[in-house]
Image (tube, rainbow, N blue to C red):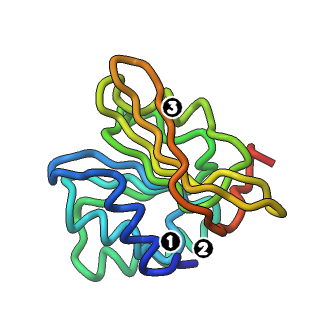
Amino acid sequence: TISQPYIVALMTQLLELKGNEKVLEIGTGSGYQAAVLAEIVGEVYTIEIYKSLSKKSEKLLTDLGYRNIKFKVGDGYHGWEEYAPYDAIIVTCAPDHVPLSLLQQIKDDGGRIVIPVGGIWMVQTLMKIEKTEGKIKSKGIIGVRFVPMIGHSR
């Protein structure tokens, strides 16, 4: 899947990237968001729950010359602890709550998450979450509609 270009741009802007960050993406999909991030930051880690989709996106982005993206097949609800902490996490599918595992995998000072939150039959809210000195602050940005996060969050 691919989100509307406006939403991809908005979510990327909300991450407030400077250019040398390490970013985790949950929900590789077509790989479009990962490619956008890879043009901006130093390292992109992306997780997709569907193996065939992950492999297709990995081949495409590798063929296009992206060398700063690492791919994983797995349940994004749990994040990718091996490479944590991340400067930022972007989630392109909607859980009904913010996974604690993702909050634990951003940096304690300056870490941020952009994530759509809400049930499959509910209006979802794009949230920006920031961690400063270990304290969490969240803000609703805009109503959105994303595919549901599947896996553990079900």
Among all residues in the image, which is located at the extreme left?
19
Seen in the picture, residue 74 relative to 2 is either above or below; the reply is above
Measured Cα–Cα span from mark 1 to mark 3: 27 Å
**Residue occupied by mark 3:** 103
Q: Which mark is residue 52?
A: 2
Q: Is residue 22 left or right of residue 146?
A: left
Give the residue type that dot 3 points to.
Leu
The tag earlier along the polypeptide, 3 or 2, is: 2
Residue at position x 32%, y 71% from top?
A: 35
Give the residue type that dot 1 points to.
Lys
**Residue occupied by mark 1:** 55
Q: Report which quarter residue 49 is drawn in.
A: bottom right
Measured Cα–Cα span from mark 3 to mark 2: 28 Å
Per the image, label 2 sits on a secondary structure element best described as helix
Mark 3–mark 2 contact, CB under 8 Å?
no
Residue at position x 80%, y 60% from top?
A: 122
Q: Report which quarter residue 143 is drawn in.
A: bottom right
Residue at position x 38%, y 81% from top?
A: 60
Q: Is residue 21 left or right of residue 60?
A: left
Residue 79 placed where, x, y %? 53, 41
Q: Looking at the image, how many numbered discs can be counted on the residues?
A: 3
Q: Is residue 45 left or right of residue 38?
A: right
Q: Nearer the viewer, residue 37 or 129?
A: 129
Residue 72: tell me if it is visible. no
Mark 1–mark 2 contact, CB under 8 Å?
yes
**Quadrant location, the N terminus:** bottom right
Residue 5 placed where, x, y %? 43, 80
